[in-house]
Image: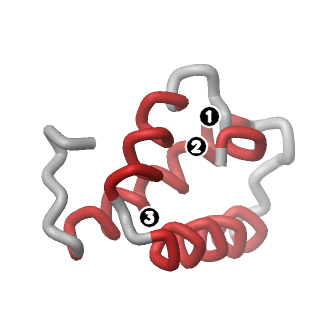
Amino acid sequence: MIGEFDDGRSKSYYCRAAALLDPAGIENALKAAGRKIKADHVPPNDAKAKAKILRAFLDALASKQGVTSEDM
């Protein structure tokens, strides 16, 4: 996650997500984020936009798994 979606501000969030969320769910979120990035034609060097997309998918996963925003 960090290598492809690092916007310079999300490392702690990604580490907490990796610790708290289901690994299969994280993998699905990464794939879904990649598809959305391609569909939205996000430039490869736009780390901020890519991170925002991934965070939305991870937040949705956290909500489904009962992980609160305070935990993340």
- Residue 9 appears at what percent x and percent y? 52, 22
Which of 1 and 40 lies nearest the eye of the viewer?
1
Quarter that holds the C terminus: top left
Q: Which mark is residue 48?
A: 1
Q: Mark 1 Cα within 10 Å, few/some/many (few <14, many 20+)?
A: some
Q: Which residue is mark 2?
A: 51
Q: Is residue 49 above or below residue 31?
A: above
Q: Which residue is mark 3?
A: 57
Which of 31 and 52 lies nearest the eye of the viewer?
31
Position of residue 44 in the picture relative to residue 13 (left or right): right
Circle 2/circle 3 CB separation < 8 Å:
no
Amino acid type assigned to the residue bearing label 3 in the image: Phe
Q: Residue at x 41, y 59 (%)?
A: 58
Earlier residue among tags 2 and 3: 2
- Residue 42 appears at what percent x and percent y? 75, 53
Q: Mark 2 Cα within 10 Å, few/some/many (few <14, many 20+)?
A: many
**Of marks 1 and 3, the one in the foreground:** 3
Q: Residue at x 53, y 70 (%)?
A: 29
Position of residue 30 in the picture relative to residue 13 (left or right): right
Label 1: state its secondary structure. Answer: helix
Circle 1/circle 3 CB separation < 8 Å:
no
Amino acid type assigned to the residue bearing label 2 in the image: Ala
Amino acid type assigned to the residue bearing label 1 in the image: Lys
Q: Mark 3 Cα within 10 Å, few/some/many (few <14, many 20+)?
A: some
Q: Is residue 56 above or below residue 71?
A: below
- The alpha-carbon separation of the residues under discs 2 and 3 comes to 10 Å
Position of residue 20 in the picture relative to residue 71 (left or right): right
Circle 2/circle 1 CB separation < 8 Å:
yes
- The alpha-carbon separation of the residues under discs 1 and 3 comes to 15 Å
Residue furthest front as drawn: 19
Label 2: state its secondary structure. Answer: helix
Q: Residue at x 70, y 67 (%)?
A: 34
